[in-house]
Amino acid sequence: MKRTVAFVAAGCLGLAALAGCDSGAKVTNSLTAPATPSESATAPAPESSPPATAEQPTSPTAVTTRPATVGDTLTIKGQIAGNKITVTLLKVTDPVTANNDFESPDPGKHWVGLKFRVTNSGTNVYDDSPENDITGYTTADEQFTNAFVSGINEGALLDPSASFRLAPGESAVGYVVVELPTGAHVGRVIYTPASGTSNVSAEWKVR
């Protein structure tokens, strides 16, 4: 049995639309190594001088990018000054089980736990609903859904009270549970603040 929760409007208002509450979220979280500046070209020697040994000009080092993966920390900044969070996907646990006898996956489905650390690295209060912020896709590129579970055996939930609020500098750690078809695996995980309505997201590649 799953508990259905709808926080879209509340999430936008409480978070002050971390990034504007625009539709069409864009992912801006590639981990980028700074490029090495190109070296200045050597000035040509005067005609009277013997020719210098030829060297190929140094090319700028290519910018190196890679997708974020499990264990990486990503920062999401809002359009409103002071709205900023840092989010780490700590672990993916497949499967997880309810810590009671009343909740279970739908037939043909199983639960996976996504363990996060969320830190309010801004100056405004972060008020949101992480269960509504999390979406993702299987390795077959099929979107999976959240499973609103009251508790699991594998650890604490990120938002057990459905009232997630962090003061500046505060952090919270816990699981968000998602439901996948039996035999399917998590391929990508996406965190979009303001109950999934923000126009900026963080994404991790799991497989």
Image (spheres, grey):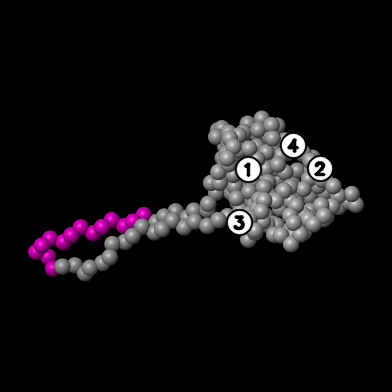
Q: Which residues are magenta?
A: 37-50
Q: Residue at x 65, y 58 (%)?
A: 140
Q: Amino acid at mark 1?
A: Thr
**Above or below: residue 30 compared with residue 26:** below
> Residues under labels 1 and 2: Cα distance?
21 Å
Q: Which one is in front in this view, the residue at disc 3 or the one at disc 4? A: 4
Q: Residue at x 75, y 52 (%)?
A: 179
The answer to whether the residue labelled 3 contacts the one labelled 4, judged by CB atoms less than 8 Å apart, is: no
> Residues under labels 3 and 4: Cα distance?
27 Å
The answer to whether the residue labelled 1 contacts the one labelled 2, judged by CB atoms less than 8 Å apart, is: no
Q: Secondary structure at mark 4?
A: loop
The one nearer the camera, 178 or 159, is: 178
Residue 43 belongs to magenta span: yes
Q: Earlier in the sequence, mark 3 or mark 4?
A: 4
Q: Is residue 36 left or right of residue 101?
A: left
Q: Which mark is residue 205?
A: 3
Q: Is residue 96 something that shows in the picture? A: no
According to the picture, the residue beneath numbered tag 4 turns out to be 6
Q: Earlier in the sequence, mark 2 or mark 3?
A: 2
According to the picture, the residue beneath numbered tag 1 turns out to be 192
Q: Which mark is residue 47?
A: none
Q: Position of residue 188 (x, y in %)?
A: 63, 54
Q: Amino acid at mark 3?
A: Lys
Q: Amino acid at mark 2?
A: Arg
- Which of the image's four quarters has the C terminus? bottom right
According to the picture, the residue beneath numbered tag 2 turns out to be 3
For disc 1, the neighbor class at 10 Å (few under 14, some 14 to 19, many from 20) is: many
